[in-house]
Image (cartoon, rainbow, N blue to C red):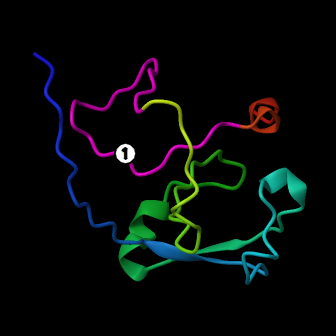
Amino acid sequence: MRRTAALTKVTCCPIGTVSSSLETLDAAPRQADEGAPDAWLVFEGDAAAGLRDIRPGDDLILITWLDRARRDVLTVEGSRVRVRSLEAIDGTPIVDLNPVLSADIGRR
């Protein structure tokens, strides 16, 4: 029996912020390979313990909330996307979805 999860309000608590030379939406490139500058990730004191095993050169996945992005421009066909090998259990909230760019795949 397939259950449909009701939309649940989820509160996200940031563990830090980005410190970047980009200060406006107009200055920001649409993709990293379009001239995005280096930036600093500045973490809150409570999150510092989670950084202890990170070393220079490690591959990381950074999840941000693009808080100044427009939320009224999303266009999709249908409302379901089938994926493979997802370890999340039924009803897990989805926060965001973006395609992996071919340039990102080549860097691995």
Q: Which residues fall within the magenta stretch?
A: 79-100
The residue shown at (41%, 72%) is 14
When the figure is inspected, residue 50 is found, relative to residue 68, above or below; the finding is: above
Q: Position of residue 98 (x, y in %)?
A: 59, 43
Q: Is residue 37 above or below residue 98?
A: below
Residue in the picture at 18% in, 38% down: 5
Q: Measuring 39% from the left and 25% from the top, which residue is drawn there?
A: 86
Q: Is residue 74 above or below residue 88?
A: below
In the foreground, 68 or 78: 78
Which residue position is annotated with label 1?
Answer: 94
- Quarter holding residue 28: bottom right
Q: Main secondary structure of the magenta part?
A: loop
Image spot of residue 11 (x, y percent)? 27, 67
The residue nearer to you, when weighing 99 against 56, is 99
Q: In the image, is residue 34 part of the stretch drawn in magenta? A: no
Mark 1: which amino acid? Ile
Q: Relative to residue 58, is residue 13 depicted above or below? A: below
